[in-house]
Image: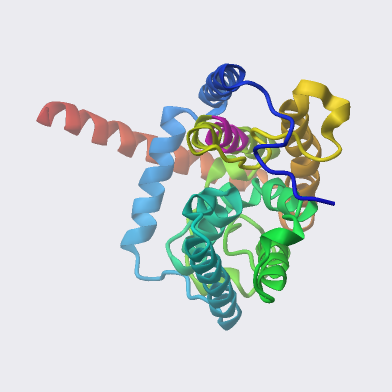
Amino acid sequence: MAAVSIDNCFKMSVTYDVLHYTTHSLIYGGIYYLAKPHHTETEKEKHQHLQMKSKKNHYKLTIFEYLLAFTLATLLLINIAVRLVKGVPSWLFQPCHVLTAILLYVILNPQSNSKGFYLFFYSLWMPLYGLAAAPHPSWFQWWFELPVFYIHHYVIVLLPYYYLFVNHRFHPHFTSSSAMVSRGTQSVIQRFTHFTGRFRHYLTVQCIALVYHSGFLGFLGLYLNEDFDSMRCRFAGGEMFGIWWREALILAGVLIVGMTLSVIPEFIAHFIFHKPPTKSTNKTNVNNDDHDEHIISRSSINKNKLS
């Protein structure tokens, strides 16, 4: 079967696509505004993170993590070199490459907290889409490209589960006796300790990902006359969705694939490793929260006086 290109695929007019990308970006931006954490929450988290950075007991990476980082860096460098040689550097803006760079930074930075991990973990449906819709064989010019493609995507799809079920580096609120937790001090983000807070964060990450697709990749595809992630060309088998193939991909990715890959496994991990706090623990947490809020309010007052 011949490869489908931007010139012979089913696509909408440029005017329709401009309206589509603009409208969708505004909708996702509005949902993000409604779902994002409150100002007091973010200020408290910033204060906690600064406190943890001031301590010397930072997380110590394991040998396995160094091997993972080396593998990710090697795969990323190969992909960068291949796309530069082929003259398509814009393809490095595909989500899988961007997510690989994010994950590499999160792993190697001993001060990374749960936010960086969840930004990647909640975006797993995108690399899985990449596996399901692998490029046409004509795209691969050298023998190593095909195995690199599959190794790359399988690694970034499976790796987060290591941090979910084995190494609790990004889940310091887990009450399990994992040896990995004691390798360094990590700040606990309170809204990630309960399902509603994590699900709100899931929605914000999806909005960021969809704004990236519509507001950036879509317009970049129009400018370069390229198709990124089926944002311009209807995918094979998408005829049943008519002109709504992009909406179908989004709904399936966010509500079905994303929930299956991220939300459900995370719920299972919290059921196994995170025991509900006792009343005395809740009282201590409330006192700590009040203390943090007092510090934040004092900091805000001092800033106002200085200004």
Secondary structure that dominates the magenta span: helix
Q: Is residue 86 visible?
A: yes
Measuring from the top left, give residue 1's x and y in whole percent. Answer: 85, 52
Furthest toward the left, the residue is 306
Q: Nearer the viewer, residue 158 or 244?
A: 244
Q: Quadrant of the C terminus?
A: top left
Q: Nearer the viewer, residue 69 or 234?
A: 234
Q: Is residue 18 left or right of residue 152?
A: left
Q: Is residue 71 left or right of residue 237?
A: left
Say which residue appears at 41% left-offset and 40% top-offset: 44
Say which residue appears at 51% left-offset and 30% top-offset: 215
Question: Which quadrant of the view contains residue 158?
Answer: bottom right
Residue 52 is a magenta residue: no
Magenta highlight range: 206-214
Q: Is residue 188 visible?
A: no
Quick check: 116 above or below 19? below
Q: Is residue 100 left or right of residue 130?
A: left
Furthest toward the bottom, the residue is 63
Question: Which quadrant of the view contains residue 217?
Answer: top right
Measuring from the top left, give residue 258's x and y in whole percent. Answer: 74, 42
Colour logic = rainbow
Measuring from the top left, give residue 149's x and y in whole percent. Answer: 68, 65
Quick check: 300 above or below 23? below
Q: Is residue 254 left or right of residue 74?
A: right
Say which residue appears at 61% left-offset and 42% top-offset: 228
Q: Nearer the viewer, residue 120 or 113?
A: 120
Measuring from the top left, give residue 250's x and y in whole percent. Answer: 72, 32
